[in-house]
Every structure is written in structure tokens, then in C-alpha cells.
Image: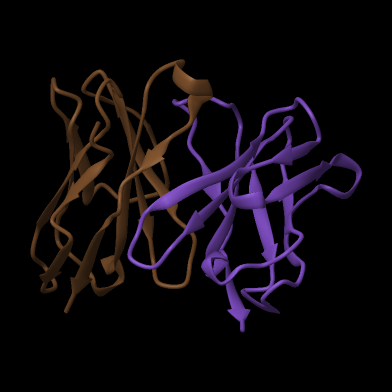
Chain colours: A brown, B purple
Amino acid sequence: DAGVTQSPTHLIKTRGQQVTLRCSPKSGHDTVSWYQQALGQGPQFIFQYYEEEERQRGNFPDRFSGHQFPNYSSELNVNALLLGDSALYLCAGAGRGGRGGEQFFGPGTRLTVL
Amino acid sequence: AQSVTQLGSHVSVSEGALVLLRCNYSSSVPPYLFWYVQYPNQGLQLLLKYTSAATLVKGINGFEAEFKKSETSFHLTKPSAHMSDAAEYFCAVSERYSSASKIIFGSGTRLSIRP
């Protein structure tokens, strides 16, 4: 059983560009959360998707948007990139009511904005 | 609002020594508390969790943590450090123990092990 996968592993963009990050949760996990981890800081919650809808959102601007597909995989889109968007982006998958609510994290995508 | 504060951004101990990583929480509702570990270039792995059952929680790799409501603390300990324990450790809190609940993380403590 594959774990949580994220692509790409690394990405370099310039200010003003747009980026799309992808996440596939473990098999059977239908809830996907995205977190931003800036260098030297803990992860911060961006938003969560369930049943292809954004269920809750953290304190991030509308430049951050997402999508969930019928197979439960998810995308994170960031528009008009800023230098401050440079970070490790983590996604976490979970199944509703399964195994006590543990969220399983992927290895992340390292985004560098120049 | 919920938050966690990790005391000490960097802790260094000798191999075989006691590991103590400190975490204090703030929550207006009974909290659910977690410790995660992050090895270089990897995602987060759950070490242990407190979900209002036993106050002393045992996790993987010999780690344990004790929930102390009176001190609003959830410190992580390990009796004897191994070189393989070198990593970043995050204390975290959520309102519910549910796959739907967002997790709020502390800023992390980097643990170094001296030979």
C-alpha cells in the first residue's frame, strides 16, 4: 500500500508566477489537508478538502486555492507568487472515522520563489 | 483559540542521556495533543497522541509524554537517546481527534545527539 505521495519534490518559480502542487492520499483516505511549513517554523494549516469541497480554511489569502478529484487526490494552486511563499508544502490524508482520526503526511514539495 | 509553545528551538544531548522536549498548550476546550517527528527531507510522522484517556502516553521509538492539565504541559521524554533520534520534533494540538480537525503546530525543536 503506497503512502501519501506528493509531486513534484522540488520546484523553483519566480515572483508573479502560478504553481500547482499535487497530492495523492493513501488508498481509501478521502480527506486531504494542506499545510505550509516555512523554514524554521512549524506547519500552518492552509485548507482541507472532503467530498471535493473545501471544508475549512486557515488564514491564507485567496491566492491559495485547491481542488479535490473524485479519486480523492488533490491539488494546491498558488497564484501571483511572492517571495514569502517559499516553503515546504505538506499534504495530509485521512479517512473519516478511521484509525482514530490520524492524519498521514506526505514528504512535501519544496517550493522556492525567486 | 488553540496554540502550543515549544520551549527551546534546539536541544542537544549526549547519546544515552535523557531526552526532554518541552511543550505548553493553550486551549479553551479539552485539547487533543500530539507529538510529530520530522527527519530531514521527509514528512511528519506521528510519535504519540493524547486523546483524554491515560495521561501518560507511550509512543513509538521509546518516547512517551505526560499530559498535565494543571501545568498545561505535554512534555516529550525518552530515557536514553540514540543517534537515530536526531530530528525535528513538533508538538501540536487540535480541537477534536478527528480526520476533519485541523492541527495547530508549534515552531519545533531540533534535537541533536552528541556521540
Q: Measured from the top left, where is residue A94 in percent x and y?
A: 38, 28
Against A54, residue A28 (above or below) is above
Furthest toward the right, the residue is B70
Q: Is residue B87 left or right of residue B77?
A: left
Residue positioned most to the bottom: B115
Residue in the image at 44% along x and 55% along y? A43
- Find residue A95 and report its horizontal and vertical position in percent: 37, 21
Query: Who is closer to the viewer here, A85 or B56?
Result: B56
Q: Tell me: residue A15, above or below residue B76.
A: below
Where residue B109 sits in the image (x, y, percent)? 60, 68
Query: Which residue is pictured at 59% across the width and 45% down the height?
Result: B60
Residue B37, placed above or below residue B97: below
Quadrant in the picture for residue B22: bottom right
Quadrant placement of the N terminus of chain A? top left
Q: Is residue B10 above or below residue A96?
A: below
Q: Residue at x 28, y 38 (%)?
A: A3
> What residue lies at 48% left-to-right and 36% top-to-bottom?
B102
Q: Quadrant of residue A65?
A: top left
Q: Nearer the viewer, residue B103 or B56?
A: B56
Quadrant of the snapshot with the C terminus of chain A: bottom left
Q: Is residue B60 left or right of residue A108?
A: right
Residue B7 in picture, x, y percent from top left: 71, 68
Q: Nearer the viewer, residue A18 or B8?
A: B8
